């Protein structure tokens, strides 16, 4: 494909897809209530006072209200021990009213997060980080699927992006994004390459991808020469930019708006993909904000609804 100077990648709108998913969930929640008298319930546990985590939990509780899912927010102090958090999780496992348990990560450093994740009842594991759910997904028999990867698949589906037989490349191999999205793409018959910090000739590898997924945690790391012309680029990263010159370099046509945001609240967000480069080279790309992050919350609602149905054999 020849890329024209005037080319600008089509934006894959996470906001619209998330709104669609939430309204579908809301319809199902209404049916569940009227036909079975069941209101799905999510318990969200927030430990400590990390500002970003508090915002994430607030957004999740707000989404529950939007779709008619009941929610409880459990706030624990920053000095909570592994044993104390464990007893909270055990009580939620035993509480029959609770369908989904979410423990917001990251946890304070004195808490052993694998102990906590493994204690969550896999049937209530709406974040899908429990080894049982991770294992089922890796085996190609997914039950609960982690929300961010599930949201990416929804976005690809809803935008009619062909996955089967596509060359897909995932940069990042975390348990919460990289590995599960690679499993899902494989299950959908993509030819999947997983890259990480030890990958050699990374731009050469990523340039083969029809679908490129960046889940790295480094601002604007994926430059134009990493992207196959016309590719679909999914940007999972969320990074703060505080420097005005950087913002000007990253955002090109929307630089002024982003610089105003920095001047107003001290930062603007950029993903792991250089947005101006992706605009020039990619066929389609997700924005940050307004892309994958919104789908993550929508898929949590879907997983909680699913948990409420499955626990009752519906
Ligand atoms: P992790 O830090 O757990 O994993 C990062 C991955 O990137 C690792 O596998 C690492 O490789 C790889 N990596 C790091 N540097 C390089 C490099 N130079 N070249 C190639 N690969 C590299 O991050 P997460 O997966 O948890 O998150 C990734 C990003 O996505 C973050 O910005 C995070 O904030 C965001 N995020 C967004 C969500 C959303 O809803 N929008 C949800 C979850 C995360 P290695 O394994 O070798 O160290």
Image: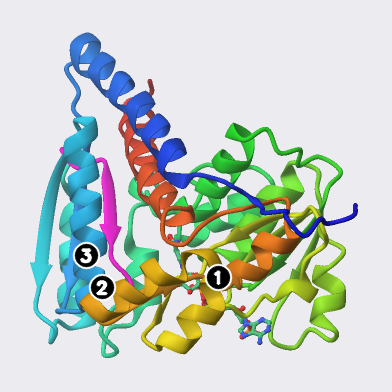
Discs 3/1, front: 1
Q: Is mark 1 within 8 Å of ligand 1?
A: no
Where in the figure is residue 134, as x and y percent of width and height?
A: 55, 57
Where in the figure is residue 166, as x and y percent of width and height?
A: 83, 47
Direction right: furthest residue: 1
The reply to whether dot 3 and dot 1 touch (C-beta < 8 Å) is: no
The reply to whether dot 1 and dot 2 touch (C-beta < 8 Å) is: no
* Dot label at residue 252: 1
Count residues near mark 1 (Cα–Cα under 10 Å), then give few for <14, some for 14-19, many for 20+.
some
Q: Element under label 1?
A: helix
The reply to whether dot 3 and dot 2 touch (C-beta < 8 Å) is: yes
Q: Is mark 2 within 8 Å of ligand 1?
A: no
Quadrant in the picture for the C terminus:
top left
Count residues near mark 3 (Cα–Cα under 10 Å), then give few for <14, some for 14-19, many for 20+.
few
Q: Say which label, 1 or 2, has the lower sequence index.
A: 2
Where in the figure is residue 226, as x and y percent of width and height?
A: 77, 73
Q: Label 3, on which residue?
A: 55
Q: Which residues are magenta?
A: 96-105
Q: Is residue 191 left or right of residue 67?
A: right
Q: Element under label 3?
A: helix
* Dot label at residue 52: 2
Q: Is mark 3 within 8 Å of ligand 1?
A: no
Q: Element under label 2?
A: helix
x 19%, y 62%: residue: 45
Marks 3/2: CA–CA distance: 5 Å
> Chief secondary structure of the magenta span?
loop
**Nearer to the camera, 302 or 54:** 54
In what quadrant does ligand 1 lie? bottom right
**Residue 99: within the magenta?**
yes
Direction top: furthest residue: 35
């Amino acid at each position: 494909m020849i890329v024209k100077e005037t080319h600008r990648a089509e934006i894959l709108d996470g906001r619209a897809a998330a709104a669609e998913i939430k309204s579908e969930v809301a319809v199902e929640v209404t049916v569940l209530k009227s036909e079975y008298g069941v209101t799905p319930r999510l318990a969200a546990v927030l430990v400590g006072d990390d500002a970003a985590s508090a915002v994430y939990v607030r957004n999740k509780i707000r989404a529950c209200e939007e779709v008619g899912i009941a929610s409880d927010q459990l706030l624990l102090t920053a000095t909570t021990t592994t044993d104390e958090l464990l007893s909270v999780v055990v009580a939620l496992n035993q509480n029959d009213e609770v369908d989904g348990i979410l423990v917001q990560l990251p946890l304070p450093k004195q808490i052993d997060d694998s102990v906590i994740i493994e204690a969550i009842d896999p049937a209530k594991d709406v974040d899908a980080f429990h080894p049982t759910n991770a294992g089922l997904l890796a085996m190609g028999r997914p039950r609960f699927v982690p929300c961010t990867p599930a949201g990416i698949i929804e976005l690809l589906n809803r935008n009619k992006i062909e996955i089967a037989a596509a060359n897909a490349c995932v940069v990042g191999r975390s348990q919460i994004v990289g590995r599960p999205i690679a499993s899902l793409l494989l299950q959908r018959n993509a030819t999947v390459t997983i890259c990480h910090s030890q990958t050699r000739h990374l731009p050469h590898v990523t340039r083969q991808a029809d679908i490129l997924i960046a889940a790295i945690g480094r601002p604007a790391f994926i430059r134009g020469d990493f992207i196959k012309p016309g590719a679909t680029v999914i940007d999972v990263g969320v990074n703060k930019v505080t420097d005005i010159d950087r913002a000007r370099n990253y955002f090109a046509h929307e630089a002024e708006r982003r610089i105003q945001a920095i001047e107003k609240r001290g930062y603007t967000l950029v993903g792991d993909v250089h947005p101006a480069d992706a605009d020039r080279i990619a066929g389609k790309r997700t924005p940050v904000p307004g892309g994958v992050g919104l789908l993550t919350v929508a898929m949590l609602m879907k997983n909680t609804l699913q948990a409420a149905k499955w626990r009752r054999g519906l």
